[in-house]
Amino acid sequence: MENWPQRIEQSGKPRYLAIADCIAQDMKDRVLLPGDRLPPQRRLADMIGVDFTTVSRGYTEAISRGLVESHVGRGTFVLPQQSVSNTSDERRALANDLTMNAPPEPTDPELLERMRAGLCAVSDDLVHLLRYQSPIGGEIDKEAASIWLSMRGLVPNLDRIAVTPGAHATMLAILTVLAQPGDCVLCEDITYTGFKKIAAQLGLKLVGLPMDRDGILPGALEDAIQRHAPKALYLNPTLHNPTTITIPQDRRLEIANVMKRHDLPLIEDDAYGFVLPDAPPPMATSAPELTWYIGGLAKCIGAGLRLAYSVAPNARAGFAMENGIRAVSVMSSPVSMALATQWVLDGTADQIRRFIRKESAVRQGIAAQTITETEFLAHPHAFNIWLRLPDGVTCATLMSHMSNHEIGISPESAFRTVGTQEQNVRVCLGGRIRREALPQTLAHLNNQIWQLARQI
């Protein structure tokens, strides 16, 4: 480690990243061997002439890459070489958006090998997959989608199914079918920030509906329909992002009855429905003739696929959705569709989903044990917690105190349809951060909340 200061300065990268790079290079050069213990953070800080927080952040980065593991009271140790993540293109890895509510990433070697085998199988037909295809998938892709959707109790005809280029593009395409600029669309008063952005882009007026612990209030929905004459209702009813609330079946039926009385279309964003083991049936099963269902694969398989298995209310609406997708993005990626189809048919997709479900529960357990200084909403299989800020503490202040740790924190104002309240923040537990790094990161978060609350 004697040459680390020079290597860190010459790298041109932020120092914490350069520290992780030094660890990776020394492992590659066999200077650091599996089982070797790294110096305590304060000692290394003195050795290489940086501050303690920089070393702490560098170790956390090394943990997130799978280079080392940390044990409280024992230290930080080098992992075996086969456990080291591929860092051949760190620039792409560093482009990860921590603010997205991503699922935990697979780490099981056997599962990763199955995923790679599926990708290799798809590559055999690569030339064909580089051609223009149907905007909403071929018959084999729709059949795979039908198999996947059946796990949520949905059995639509293939002419209602579309393999679409991710939930965002699908929402955009559906809204272009249902509404015109200036029209009103209803949603939760705390709603998915991506939907807010799409509505704003299309010039739509969003009206948020009040919620309780069981979701939107049916009476408020009735009043809003009569007052605003909306073109559609958008809901994220299962593991709601960001509050983690799941609308129970009896409330879903009440909402569906209001929709039917007023013939109000529903855009159902079921992003997390496949993750929850005991999720209520989709609202599309209660009001199929009114529901545009979006079963995104980002949360239950992987966001990089940019795919959703979507269902239109009827065949005619399916044709309209196809035209909308064609206008928005021409087609879904044939490579992604082929890979998703391969994984669904050979069972890999279900294994990924089960890993995400199990790992999310473990991470929620870590959060429950670690965050003690304030209250938060959570669910055993959610990817985030909805954390209440102590009076006087702002999200911006908390985020500035967490700048040395890679964890996604978003303010309540990003999700509110009206107002800029900052009583809560969404804290993401999944994505790139590894389970081994989570206890230390959440402990630091908890400590910062304690300190900030006592400064008020």
Image (cartoon, rainbow, N blue to C red):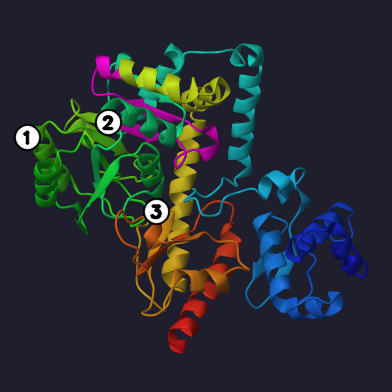
- Front label number (1 vs 2): 2
Q: Which residues are magenta?
A: 293-318
Mark 3, residue position:
382
Q: Secondary structure at mark 3?
A: loop
Task: Give left or right: position of 284 versus 259.
Answer: right
Mark pair 1, 2: CA separation: 20 Å
Mark pair 3, 2: CA separation: 32 Å
Expressed as whole percent of the image width and height from the top left, the position of residue 407 reads 55, 61
Q: Is residue 297 magenta?
A: yes
Q: Secondary structure at mark 2?
A: loop
Mark 2, residue position:
179
Expressed as whole percent of the image width and height from the top left, the position of residue 75 reads 70, 73
- Front label number (3 vs 2): 2
Expressed as whole percent of the image width and height from the top left, the position of residue 150 reads 32, 28
Which mark sits nearer the N-terminus, 3 or 2? 2
Residue 281 in sight from this viewpoint? no
Amino acid type for the residue under numbered disc 1: Arg
Mark 1, residue position:
261
Task: Give left or right: position of 257 versus 450.
Answer: left
Q: Residue at x 9, y 38 (%)?
A: 257
As drawn, the residue found furthest toward the left would be 261
Q: Secondary structure at mark 1?
A: helix
